[in-house]
Amino acid sequence: MNKDETIIWEGTPSQWTNLSFYLVCVIFTAAFGLGLLMALWMYFETKCHKIQITDQRIILRTGIFSKTINETELYRVKDITLLQPFILRLVSLSTIYIDSTDHSNPQLSIKGVPNGQFIKEKLREAVDLRRDIKGVKEVDFN
């Protein structure tokens, strides 16, 4: 990260996003004994998924043993959608979906974030500002 970048939000997805997987793991633990290992793997996979949103880009770091870092420049963001599924809404969490013109990662999902509406608005403002700074205009051809 550059020293002139400002962090808007950083964190990891909430483990609540894995609730249905963990429930299946309970069944597998009772039946085959594998559920506990599966649940631990999912826990660490989610814990190692780091998200950083700055005023210039979105940085996703994933992987337990092998790491992958994927960056999307904010001026490439085309659309931001906030989704609040019932289960996540009960625990005040949201999922933010981002469509972009980035070739390696055109669709991003930031799952299980607190204050989703606030983060979405801050992200939208940062995208508009970054486009102005870069002089980028969106033109769609149908």
Image: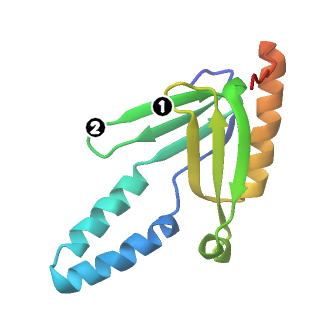
Q: Is residue 21 left or right of residue 56?
A: left
Q: How is the image coloured?
A: rainbow
**Where, by quadrant of the figure, is residue 123 drawn?**
top right
Label 1 SS:
strand
| Marker disc for residue 66 | 2
Q: Is residue 21 left or right of residue 25?
A: right
Please give the name of the residue rendered at 18% of the width and 84% of the height, measured from the top-left corner.
31
Please give the name of the residue rendered at 34% of the width and 36% of the height, measured from the top-left corner.
67
Where does the N terminus fall, quadrant-wise?
Answer: top right
In this rendering, the answer to whether 130 lies above or below 99 is above
Q: Is residue 121 left or right of residue 81?
A: right
The residue at the far top in this view is: 135
Mark 1 belongs to which amino acid? Asn
**Where, by quadrant of the figure, is residue 141 drawn?**
top right
Please give the name of the residue rendered at 64% of the width and 69% of the height, measured from the top-left corner.
85
Q: Position of residue 134 (x, y in %)?
A: 77, 14
**Where, by quadrant of the figure, is residue 29 drawn?**
bottom left
Where does the C terminus fall, quadrant-wise?
Answer: top right
Which of the pair 28/69 is nearer the observer?
A: 28
| Marker disc for residue 34 | none
The residue at the far front in this view is: 142
| Marker disc for residue 70 | 1
Dot 2 crowding, Cα within 10 Å, few <14, some 14–19, many 20+: few
Q: Position of residue 79 (x, y in %)?
A: 73, 39
CA gap, disc 1 to disc 2?
Answer: 13 Å
In this rendering, the answer to whether 28 lies above or below 77 is below
Q: Position of residue 91 (x, y in %)?
A: 63, 74
Q: Position of residue 98 (x, y in %)?
A: 65, 42
Label 2 SS:
loop
